[in-house]
Image: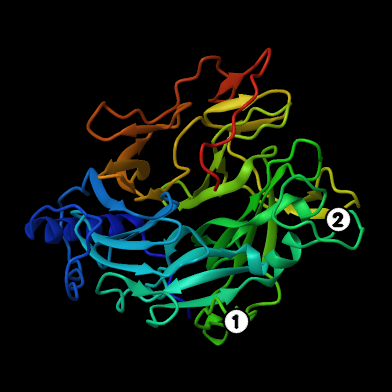
Amino acid sequence: MRPRLPSRPGLTALLAAATVTALSAGHGTAHARAPAGPVPAAAPAAAGFSPPPAVIDGGAWRSGHLQGMALDPIRGVMYFSFTNLLVKTDLAGRPLGSVTGLTGHLGDLDVNPDDGRLYGSLEYKSAEAFYIAVFDPDRMTRMNLDAQTSGVMTTVHLRQVADDYTADMDGDGVFDGDTGDTPDHRYGTSGIDGLSFGPAFGGRGGNRLTVAYGVYSNTTRQDNDHQVLLQYDVGDWGRYERPFSEDDPHRTGPASSDGRFFVYTGNTTYGVQNLAWDPASGDWLMAVYRGRKPGFPHYTLYVVDGSAPVRLAPVRGQPVPQLGHHLTLRRSGLFDLPTGISGHRAAGQYGLVPVGDGTHYVAEAGTVSSGGVTRRTGRAVLHHWTGAVNPFERVGRAVPRTKPVPRVPQGGVSVHRPAARAAAGSPRERR
């Protein structure tokens, strides 16, 4: 029998104890220079009552920008994905290990509560290959481990994603490659990014890995207005896991997912950047970059109602009529009357980690320059969830609200009636 997902109050207590363990060693922040020699792993957590840290600093690195974060309350560590670099810190921000040699695109992260390992989305578009990277936290005990040769990372190929990405939708016999300016790519698929562990949709039970598609921004087509989520039972994935070689990328993995699900949000720019299941509410949070297609409200955070049943209905805009399994957005924050879409204007695109007690770590990403060298920064900042238009309220700055404050009462949400929508800009950085 598979272990159940840990209760979040238990995780909060473990996190609190790990905080005490980390802080007792002295506060520190990660730096671009790695400590010499191996770094001891964080001590396992025990019961405790201190609050989680308000800020966990992920450091400054010569890397890509921050893509995602994951909290391991059992080990008392936080992971930061910097596109081509993975950093592991304790809860005081002290670096414990890192993984380099990631020549693809490492995106969102989450810890599997069943096996304690770290999972991340990994793209190699030049090879038309998409993987789940699985990292062994017990091997990540020093800086600059090579992803391809150290044994710290294995990978599982997602064939269904590759098939949708390479789909020749206009039937001209030519795949147009990594560009959004084409009718190719089924559902506008640009790959994968957001991922999270949580329950199976539709109350089918069990722990599942949910993987969100990236979706190209393309305002000229009608079949790219959904977020697409795949769910996988990873309990038997040991038979698929392989080391990754850039010279010979493997294609070993499940032939298909255990379910494909659609969420109607309107077209976004590169789809779900960060996906997070919140055990406190049972809902799923999807942080995105704003879309540009006229006629949609272009929120930056959508909440999937975890209690709503899965609906079988047509998938809008498809060139060939298609039925699909649909999820329901919770009516919170703002509600757009013309489209029936609800959402929030909020951060979370660079990292979003529900603690499960009504608080969430929201990523802040930036840059620092010194001596002509630019480094990318990232840190996890604790926020209360308020349910308001911008639902994240930084811990310690104000008294948290427990309910949204609507501008126009309608089912507990604010009603968004834009007379004229300004064109939404693309994010400053690609992916």
Q: Where does the image place residue 399, in percent across and percent down from the top left? A: 26, 27
Q: Amino acid at mark 2?
A: Met
Residue that label 2 marks: 169
Q: Secondary structure at mark 1?
A: loop
Q: Where does the image place residue 99, in percent across and percent down from the top left? A: 36, 69
* Left or right placement of residue 428 versus residue 255 in this view: left
- Give residue 164's mark: none
Q: Amino acid at mark 1?
A: Asp
Note whether 128 is above or below 240 in the view shown: above
Note whether 72 is above or below 247 in the view shown: above
Between 34 and 295, which is closer to the camera in this rendering? 34
Between 49 and 383, which is closer to the camera in this rendering? 383
Outermost residue toward the bottom in this view? 239
Residue that label 1 marks: 248
Q: Quadrant of residue 165?
A: bottom right
Is any part of residue 344 visible from this angle?
Answer: yes
Q: Where does the image place residue 255, in percent across and percent down from the top left? A: 70, 76
